[in-house]
Image (cartoon, helix red, strand yellow):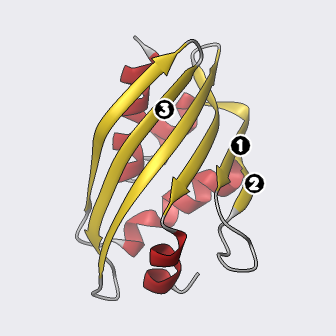
C-alpha cells in the first residue's frame, strides 16, 4: 500500500474518531505539531502520541452529527506525503465549522511518525474557544 493510500485511511479514521485504527498506524514515538502560538491557540505546538489519541478519542463529542473530511490533493515523495483537505461539520454547540488544512506526514517503516498540521487557527479558536 502506498503512503498516499495510508494517509487516506488515516484521515478517514480521524474523521470517524477510530482511535484503534489511528493507534495501529502511528509509531510509538509519533509526534503531532499544530501551527500557531500556544498563547493564542491552546492546541498549537508539539504533541505526543497519547495527546493525539486522546484528542481524536474525544473528537466525536465535538461533532455529534459527524463530519465531512475531504482530501483535495496529495503529493508523495519518498517518506513524505503532503495533503490538502477540508473539514466541514456542525459542532456540539450548533455552530458551523469549515476549515482548510495542509498536512505533512512523515513515514517510518510503513507507519506515520510525524504529522504537521496547518490550518486557519483563528477559525478554530473562535469556533471552539481554544
Labels 3, 2: front one: 3
Work out whether mark 2 precedes mark 1 in sequence or the reverse, and give the earlier one: 1
| CB atoms of marks 2 and 1 within 8 Å | yes
Q: Residue at x 66, y 65 (%)?
A: 36
In the picture provided, is 106 more to the left or to the right than 17?
right
Element type at mark 2? strand
The image quarter in which residue 115 lies: top right
The dot on residue 31 is: 1
| Pointer 1 local density, CA inside 10 Å: few below 14, some 14–19, many at least 20 | many
Quadrant where the image shows the C terminus: bottom right
The dot on residue 46 is: 2
Badge count: 3
Work out whether mark 3 precedes mark 2 in sequence or the reverse, and give the earlier one: 2
Residue at mark 3 to residue at mark 2: CA–CA distance: 19 Å
Quadrant where the image shows the N terminus: top left
Residue at mark 3 to residue at mark 1: CA–CA distance: 16 Å
Element type at mark 3? strand
Where residue 59 appears, as percent x and y from the top left, is 45, 64
Front residue of 13 and 82 = 82
Residue at mark 2 to residue at mark 1: CA–CA distance: 7 Å
- Provide the residue designation for mark 3: 82
Amino acid at each position: 500500500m502506498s503512503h498516499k493510500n495510508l494517509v487516506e485511511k488515516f484521515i478517514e479514521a480521524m474523521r470517524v474518531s477510530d482511535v484503534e485504527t489511528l493507534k495501529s498506524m502511528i509509531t510509538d514515538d509519533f509526534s503531532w505539531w499544530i501551527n500557531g502560538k500556544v498563547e493564542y491557540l491552546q492546541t498549537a505546538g508539539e504533541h505526543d502520541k497519547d495527546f493525539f489519541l486522546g484528542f481524536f478519542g474525544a473528537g466525536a463529542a465535538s461533532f455529534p452529527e459527524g463530519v465531512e473530511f475531504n482530501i483535495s490533493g496529495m503529493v508523495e515523495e519518498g517518506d513524505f506525503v503532503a495533503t490538502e483537505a477540508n473539514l466541514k461539520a456542525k459542532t456540539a454547540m450548533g455552530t458551523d465549522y469549515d476549515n482548510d488544512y495542509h498536512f505533512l506526514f512523515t513515514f517510518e517503516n510503513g507507519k506515520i511518525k510525524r504529522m504537521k498540521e496547518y490550518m486557519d487557527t483563528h477559525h478554530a479558536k473562535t469556533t471552539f474557544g481554544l
